[in-house]
Amino acid sequence: MTNRTAVATLVAAPLLLLAGWAVMKLAWVPYSHSLPWSEALAVWTAGHVFYLAAYVAFVPVILTLGRLVSKGSATGVKLASRALTAVSLVGVGGFVGQMVIHLAVGFQAGHREAMSAVSAGFKAYPGVSVLFYGLVPSLYLAGIVLLVVLAAALRRIGVAVALAVLLSGILIGSQDVALMTAGTVGLCLGLGALALALRGPALSPSPG
């Protein structure tokens, strides 16, 4: 992964997440019942495409953070970094699966009122609720936050950036709409600041 790609995804991933959040909360939630189904479906699809792109973009973000913590660290820190990276990637996989299911629900439903029944049909398959709607998806953000905190403890990044990401993760995890919105904006600012701070050799690929 090049330095330019790492910096770009640190900026793009949270911005795409914010775009998906904005579409769903500002367009889908207030207007989906009053819009013609074709327009409502377009809003639903756009929001989830933004979300899907965001979670895919978080993969290089997680790998970048894992490399930042591991590079030049003791064996125990490297093992912790790899474990957190793996946990976070599993969470990304959970959210990607959830977005794919939501897109399928939209295209299969035919109208707004049918979506709940179609969604219940998908969740009835063994393992779907656990893997894509339970604790698993939330692991992606927990892993990112812990990697950032560990990087700050190792003095690889500034404490202010780590605190911003940590607070954003707590706000997003609150499940309150206003707090989650503030947390998503904060994540954009925190990871954006991290991208600016780490444009140099710290993000360059390891020789090994």
Image: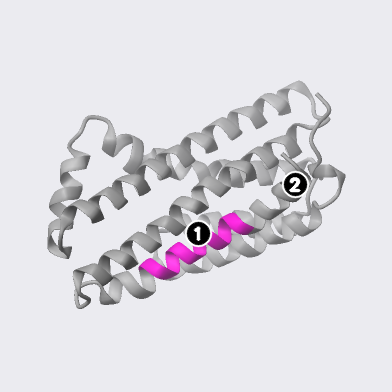
Say above or below: 18 vs 85: below
Binning the other alpha carbons within 10 Å of mark 1 as few (below 14), some (14 to 19) or many (20 upward) gives many
- The residue positioned 75% from the left and 21% from the top of the image is 75
Name the quarter where the N terminus is drawn.
top right
Res 152 label: 2
Q: Which mark is residue 73?
A: none
Q: Residue 17: which numbered mark, if any?
A: 1
Dot 2 or dot 1: first in sequence order is: 1
Q: Residue drawn at (44%, 45%), measured in percent from left and top?
A: 138
Find out whether residue 17 is within the magenta segment. yes
Q: Which residue type carries mark 1? A: Leu
- Determine the residue positioned at 48% across, 34% down: 90
Where's the C terminus, which quadrant? top right
Question: Please, which residue is most extreme toward the front here?
Answer: 38
| Mark 1 residue element | helix
Task: Indicate the quadrant where residue 69 lies.
Answer: top right
Q: Where is residue 87 in the image (x, y as percent from the top left)?
A: 52, 33
Q: Which amino acid does label 2 sit on?
A: Ala
Q: Name the residue rendered at 53%, 63% in the picture.
A: 183
Q: Give the range drawn in magenta.
A: 12-24
The stretch drawn in magenta includes residue 90: no
Instruction: For mark 2, give the secondary structure.
Output: helix
Left or right of 28? Residue 64 is: right
Q: How many labels does the image show?
A: 2
